[in-house]
Structure formats: structure tokens, C-alpha cells
Image: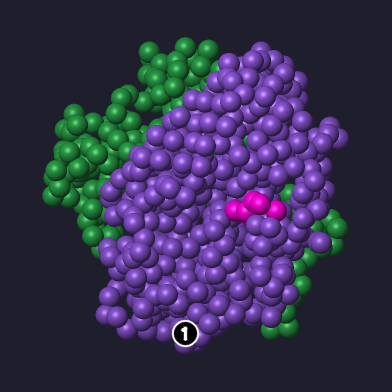
Amino acid sequence: MAINEQTLASMRELVARYPQPRSALLPMLHLVQSAEGEVTTDGIAACAEVLGISPAEVTGVSTFYTMYKRKPVGEHHIGVCVNTLCGLLGGDAVYEALSERLGIGHNEPTADGKFSLERIECQAACTHAPVMTVDWEFMDDVTPTSALDVIDRLSRGERVESTRGPVIRNFEATEHTLAFPDDGLAGEGISVDAKMLAGLRYAKEHNMSAPRSGQEG
Amino acid sequence: MTLTPVITEHWDQPDLYTLDGYKRVGGYVALEKALKLDPDAIINTVKDSGLRGRGGAGFPTGMKWSFVPQNDGKPHYLVVNADESEPGACKDIPIMMANPHALIEGVIITSFAIRANHAFIYIRGEVPNALRKVANAVAEARRAGLIGKNILGSGFDLEIVVHSGAGAYICGEETALLDSLEGFRGQPRLKPPFPAVAGLYASPTVINNVETICNIPYIIDRGVDWFRSFGTEKSPGFKVWAVSGHVNNPGIFEAPLGITMRQLLEYAGGVRGGGKVKFWLPGGSSVPLLTEEHLDLPMTYEEMAAAGTMLGTGTPMIFDETVSVVKAVTRWLEFYKHESCGKCTPCREGTYWITGMLENFEHGHAKESDLDLLVSACNQIAGRSFCALGDAAATPFPAALKYFRDEFVAATNSPVDDAFDPVASYIYAGAATR
């Protein structure tokens, strides 16, 4: 599918953000995925055209980064962290349970195109291990049971909230956010949870605080 | 040592992420002060504070700023490294989700100090919720005249761009980050020249970690003496510690540098089930692991170095006795192998060979002499790679061998999953779900 005029206009809008046009390439490739579902040959050609570089150069960049997919991704892209901490604390079992239920392996989509699955690396949420992501939104502290429940609810088209973020949309919507992150959803859902407040709450319960200087108001 | 919430002090305010919420707790007061100061005075204040980079290396922040040549006629840039991807590191993403305006305020003050009119916040792509929080804060600050032309009537202009990465651990390395931000494959650059002289677009560039930048408004507002009342002479200040692993209450705990792991463990509710710490890492998988005997060491840059490890990101991972150290190290090497950018041979080939050999131990078909071969292979990578990723990849195995040689020997002819039931390490209740 050729890249439409609206997407091309958005690409030019991204280019205008930067002192040098090529700096926009990573967000532009996210935009391609939001429009095409993956990094397509047409998308590569469009990036190359807008930036005045060769399609080979764009391809070279797109193949370096794991978030850019060169084959179809599901409507919902599921990630399970299998790095040491998450994996050993139960992420391995979560991945196996999802892989078995969905009948797919790493970076594969289901036959109906509903889901794809990825063994992901550290998601910067180790305090919330094991960590899963749905369309890159956090699903913290999962178990095989709770992970399968998320899949079931998404399959039925039910509303599923990220544990630290907004209601789950789909892979392409998240990719659009990665290109244009001021997506109007900053106020949705919970972003600060009990684990992020563990120290603050402990400090308050035990009358601990940082000393203040005299000049502070 | 008590907890000292500073950066995290108001995280329980539901609207802290908004401009109004941040201003209500004193936000942007430091910016007003800073814009009336001479930029060099700000650089000197940060130098005097002794603040050291919170991204892992611990380089003195003020010194880094002072390397930027002034009156050179070139544009200057500030780039915030928000590519937090180190296994075990999970403090910058929470900071951005909870208190994005502290980052923005720090970015404006820092840009003013180093005379940059363009700042970039490079956030890893896998965390859209951090991206949208920071982008929202930038938009709010722009509408309020805190970003843009003639900020608060100071004559200072600044644009801030929130930039998304696309999945590459190597982009946390500052020169790889610059290449990525310029729209290339994220591979490290040869140094020198250092970014302070020739960074983004070959112009003078300061690259700082998120937590580092979040310290700046507090230092400007409350002063050097106040800042130095926390921590030690060589490691002043406070730290957002993120404690993860086999503890009862994992989470974020802010306390001065110099707190011990034993104290942090107490705040985190101790090891689950009253168990013992088998091994722990002070700050990410790239620092050598420690054991229970090190729990009482002050966690400062200097004391961790003296113990043969590093403070790193200050995000301790705790593993109890259910965990096979062989399996843990093998998994980390699989990560480094996956993330090696391929630019230099020692790292590209070395991570491949080390990982393969470690997997032989994990599956119980290795030879004891392989341990010497592994040490040799690590020595061929450490100090011989293009960037710190190679050094990091050569770190986990020698540290593990130092304390747990018997476990590697036992794994030569017996799969580690036989000796360590994987289910026992699961953190959730009723873990036997398979």
C-alpha cells in the first residue's frame, strides 16, 4: 500500500522538529508502522524520498532496531521480559504459557492477525517483575494466569487497562504515539503505583524526611 | 540512615505530572532563580555540589558541563539520555512518569548554563507512557512560556524535542545515542573528540542522565551546602534507589548515597520468606555481583569500587538462594550478545562465544577446563572493545566465578534446572502453575 498524503505530511512535520532532517528518521519509521503495521518497502521509499537519502540507507537503519518489524505484527503486540530478573522470577513461565495458548513463537503473529508475541529485553520495570507489555504499555507483576486473562479479554474485545498507563488501544496506535508522543493520554490511567511509592510511604509512616535548608520556602 | 524523599517527595500527589501540580509544590522556582544568574555561576554551583552522573559512570556533572567551549560561535546542545535499558535499572522511567516537570525544569536550567538553545530528550521507544508524560509536560511548559522565545523575560530561547528510540540497548552509550539521534544505526563513535567538543551535528553537546538532570533544580533552589549534607565527600547527594528481586516490598526508595544494602533491604521488607541473599548487584547487570558479606558496605561510588564492583545505576537486584548463578549469568550474556551492535570484533564475536560456552554449563555438558577458557575469552573482550558494552559483557562471569566456582563445576555434567527448580525462583504465590 502506498504511503498516503496525510502520512507524508506528518513525516514532513517530524522533519521540521529537528535542526537536521535525518534526525527525524526514527520517529518516521514509527509513523510508517502506525500506518502500515510494519516497516514496508513503500514506507522505506517514502522516508527516503522525504529525507533525500537512498532506500538502502533507510533499510540499514530500520534493520538495526528491534522495534521495527519487517513482517506482520498482530493487532496487539505482546512482549514478555525474559531477561534474568523477570525471566527467573516467572517471566519464562509467562512466555511459555502465552506461546502455548497463542500457538506462536518469538516475533510471530497468530493466523487471525490478532496477536504477536516477542521475548523482550529489560523493560526498566524490574521492581514490577515479571513484566509483560501489550502494545508496549505496561502490564506489571504478571503471572501465567493473569497474562492469559489479559489475552482472553483482548480477544473478546473487552476494555483492558495498562497497570501503569492508559486503556490498551492497539499496536498501530502506540506506534503513532512514538512518532507524536503528545497524544492527549497523559492523564489517563494510573502511572504512579504502590511500588513507586514504597519508599515515600515508608518514610511518611516512620516520620522520615529530607532535611530542608533555610532558604527553601 | 533514613529515607530522604526529595525527587520523589510529592509522587503521591495525583496531579504532580501536570504543570499546576508541580508548581503547587514549588516547581519552577529554581528556574526563576537560575535565569537571574550568570550561566558560569550555575556551572560552578553544580561543580561545587559534587553531583556525579546517575546514569552509571558517576562522572562529575559540573566538570562535564565545563568542557563545553564557550563563545565558539557554534550551536550547543543538551541531550538527555533517557534510554534506560540496563537490566535491573528502573528509576528513570518511573521518574519521568511521576514527575516529568522536574526533568523539564532541569533541562531548561542546564541548557541555560551551557548556552544551548536546543535540547533533546531521547527516551527508549518501548515505554510510550514515559514518552507521553514528558511530551505533555513539554507542551504545558511551552504554553506557559517556560519553553520557547525569551523565557520569563530573560532573553533566553530554548526548544525541547522529545525523541523516541526504537529498541537498542547500545543507544544508552552516549555516542551511539548521538548517532541514533542523527538518524543512523546506533553505533558508538571513536573518542576523542568527546561530545563536549564535537557531539550532536559535530557541535558541543552535553549528555546527561534523567536522574542527574532532576537533581539540578534542587541544587539551584536549596544550595550546595544543603546538597552536600547528604552522602559523602566523594559521593554527595541523594539517590533514587530501585530495589528489585526476591524482596517482600520491591520498589523505589530515595535515600542518601552511602546507605547500605542491608538498610535498603529492611525498607524493602527483607528477603521473601525470611530467606537469605545469595547474590546481588548494586546497579545493573554490567556491574560485578556481590554476596551477603557485602550488605553492610556504604553504597557510594568509592566504596563500591573498593569492593571490586561499581555503583552503576544504583538499582539493586536481589537474588535469593533458589536462583542458579550459572543460569543468571548465562541469561545476561544472552542479552549482551543480542545487544552487541557488531561494530567491533571482540564484542561481536566474544559475546557469541561466551554465551555459547555458558549455555553448555546451563545444560550440563561442559568441561571444567572451559572455565579457564571463559576467563580467557572475557579477558579478550574487556578493555579491547570499542565501547563499554563489551566491558560490561565481560563482567558478569568472572564475578560469578569468584564467589560461586563450585556451582559452575557442578554444572559441567548436570543441568542447572535439575539442581535449581526454576519454579522455586518464581515470585508469585502458587507459582507451580505448569
Q: Quadrant of the N terminus of chain B?
A: bottom right
**Mark 1 Cα-neighbour bin, 10 Å: few <14, some 14–19, many ≥20:** some
Give chain B's shade: purple
Question: Which residue is pictured at 80% across the width and 53% down the height?
Answer: B296
Taking the magenta stretch, the answer to whether it contains residue B78 is no
Question: Which residue is pictured at 47% across the width and 50% down the height?
Answer: B383
Work out whether B428 lies above or below B7.
above
Residue under label 1:
B40
Which x, y percent locates residue B201? 27, 63
Which x, y percent locates residue A172? 36, 34
Among the 4 quarters of the image, the one containing residue B337: top left
* A7 or B231: nearer the viewer: B231
What chain is tagged by disc 1?
A: B
Question: Which residue is pictured at 24% across the width and 39% down the height?
Answer: A60
Is residue B163 shown left or right of residue A123? left
Among the 4 quarters of the image, the one containing residue B212: bottom right
Span highlighted in magenta in the image: B307-312
* B47 or A51: nearer the viewer: B47
Question: Which residue is pictured at 44% across the width and 31% down the height?
Answer: B352
Give chain A's shade: green
* B411 or A139: nearer the viewer: B411
Which x, y percent locates residue A35? 28, 35
Work out whether B145 lies above or below A60.
below
Q: Secondary structure at mark 1?
A: helix
